[in-house]
Amino acid sequence: FDPMVLRRYSELMTFSQHQHPDEASMYMFFGNRTPLWRLLRLRYIFRPHDESTDTIEFSGGLPHLLLISDWKRLGNRDEILNALRSPSFDPLSRVILEADPNPVPASVPASGTVELVGSDTDSLTISASVSTPTLLLITDGYSEYWRAVPMPGSSQHHYDVMPADYTLMGVPLSAGKHLFRLEYAPSGYVIGRWISLVALASYLLAIGWCQRRYRSIGLFSGSE
């Protein structure tokens, strides 16, 4: 529900419509169904038809959270998008990264559990338990302003949030139990929040000072 469209998401969707990603903008047109939409948890398509609306169920969409051990590094946007569109690419078993993950996932099939414990408009709380290093794929739009904060009881003290499959998020996990909060905190929002809090506190202090001053001169006691 963000009022803006993230660049990576717009480029992927533009590419999915057989247009060059350099032409991407916040205004997008969807006319051609494509397997690329599986990456984004698409389940239903609503299409206007005469005076009614057709509902089409789209199968094969990824879950919100997915543990994957098989990965490939590609550093070029166009290479990544073409690899995602390849018929041989299986998003359920392989993820494409732009840098080496740390820790590096073990070269065995991912095993373990992952659960979304809680969520709100700007954060996800995630619990996971894995027996070997693996990669957690989160099928929400990547932004440099996402950060993962370890919570008490987590076996890992630092988590990287990296772009995965170009427009999604990947979090490398070491073997063990994990509990962390994924927070969306753009610098402008954080600065604006603190300015608002300081301004509110100043306003309340000013009201309190004015009330004490008026009481001291009898304005609130009924005296003339």
Image (tube, helix red, strand yellow):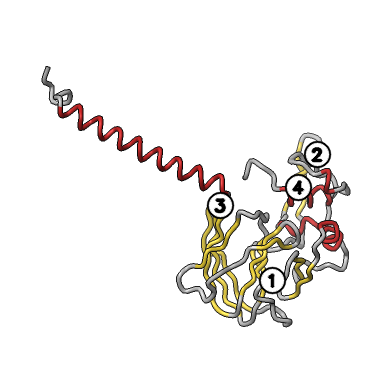
Amino acid type assigned to the residue bearing label 3 in the image? Ala
Residue at mark 3: 185
Tag on residue 10? 4
Task: Give me the C-alpha separation between circle 3 and circle 1.
Answer: 22 Å
Q: Nearer the viewer, residue 133 or 55?
A: 133
Task: Give me the C-alpha separation between circle 3 and circle 2.
Answer: 41 Å
Task: Give me the C-alpha separation between circle 2 and circle 1.
Answer: 46 Å
Choose top left, top right, bottom left or bottom right for residue 91: bottom right
Task: Give me the C-alpha separation between circle 4 and circle 2.
Answer: 26 Å
Name the quadrant of the C terminus: top left
Q: Earlier in the sequence, mark 1 or mark 4?
A: 4
Tag on residue 49? 2
Q: Identify the residue at image location x=61%, y=82%.
A: 131
x then y, percent, for residue 22: 83, 46
Task: Give me the C-alpha separation between circle 1 and circle 4.
Answer: 25 Å
From this view, report whether residue 112 is shown above or below residue 61.
Answer: below
Q: Earlier in the sequence, mark 4 or mark 3?
A: 4
Dot 3 alpha-carbon crowd within 10 angstroms: few under 14, some 14 to 19, many 20 or more: some
x then y, percent, for residue 70: 75, 75
Q: Earlier in the sequence, mark 2 or mark 1?
A: 2
Is 37 positioned to the left or the right of 115 in the image? right
